[in-house]
Image: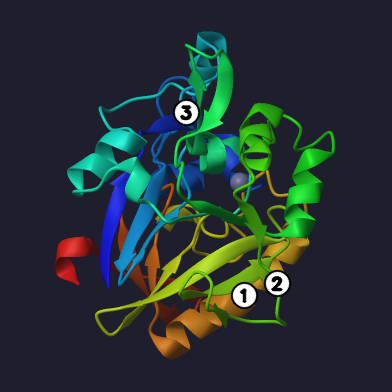
Amino acid sequence: MTLYPIETGNFKLDGGAMFGVVPKSIWQKTNPSDSNNMIDISARCLLLEEKNKLVLIDTGMGDKQSEKFFSHYYRWGDNNLVKSINSAGFSTDEVTDVFLTHLHFDHCGGASFFNKKDERNEVVFKNATYWSNREHWNWAKEPNSREKASFLIENLEPIESSGQLKFLKKIGSGFNYYNEIGFELLFVDGHTEKQMIPKITYKGYDLVFTADLIPTVGHIPVPYIMGYDIRPLTTMNEKAVFLEEVVKNKYLLFFQHDAHNQIASLKETEKGVRLETVLDFNDI
Ligand SMILES: [Zn+2]
């Protein structure tokens, strides 16, 4: 298997919203903010090449909303999804599967685009199967008022109407292997209903795509949880179990939202599980 990190463009989010009850005096040490209190956020995805499959994990936010919408997110950097897939040596038509950890706009927006000629939103990956799970899909289609701003109908409708959407089913607790996509998944419910966390075996390592379970290095300690999470106590329990497993089995973490740290190993300390070393793809 070959893995390619896919940078889909960086943005910024409010540091307070990203750290919930953690005081700024603490979070600003790992995630320094600008004069607007905004912190750097990436939307780093992964492309897996194996045998006849080319699987994309998440898609970033894409570019089909209005300038006003994007003005809230202070996008920065030169990367975008299609450019990064092309730089890895592939066309969008070669992608066989698009796996979506969850349907918040910064994870699935890049899966579709606005076709100016036909004046409608269409899927970017015309030959791909799109993977979600039924419980999360239904949750996103009828969003609660808390998550309404993150689940956008213009991101869901093109995937559904393409006929290319399929659902994976939760098989019990912990990580389980899914033949359809070729890697393991952990289902977690704290950030949103049934977010799916991938674990990929790569060059002898177990690499976990942490998505919104642990968005940045600053979010490693158990109580450091985003204000966006719908069930923070559930996230705390899920993280505690997950972090013990990471240390015990020497998993590496791949961060989707950490603009400055790509991969990390963790260690057990007196205070709990903490960062050991930061790595990037060239190190593994
Ligand atoms: Zn999310």
Q: Is mark 2 within 8 Å of ligand 1?
A: no
Q: Which mark is residue 249?
A: none
Left or right: 209, with 6 as reference point: right
- Considering every residue shown, the one lying at the far bottom of the view is 248
Q: Mark 2 = which residue? A: 237
- Given residues 232 and 98, the one toward you in this image is 98
Tell me if residue 13 comes above or below residue 1 in the rendering: above
Q: What residue type is labelled 1?
A: Ala
Q: In this orientation, does residue 217 appear? A: yes
- Given residues 261 and 138, the one toward you in this image is 138
Earlier-in-chain disc, 3 versus 1: 3
From the image, which quarter does the C terminus lie in?
Answer: bottom left
- Given residues 223 and 152, the one toward you in this image is 152
Residue shown at the point (62%, 79%) measured from the top left: 241
- Are there few (<14), some (14-19), or many (20+) residues within 10 Å of tag 3? many
Tell me if residue 216 comes above or below residue 7 in the rendering: below
Residue shown at the point (23%, 41%) measured from the top left: 86
Q: Quadrant location of residue 167?
A: bottom right
From the image, which quarter does the N terminus lie in?
Answer: bottom left
Q: Which amino acid does label 2 sit on?
A: Asn
Q: Which mark is residue 38?
A: 3
Q: In this orientation, does residue 259 appear? A: no
Q: Residue 240 carries which label?
A: 1
Tell me if residue 266 comes above or below residue 68 in the rendering: below
Circles 1, 2 touching at the beta carbon (< 8 Å): yes
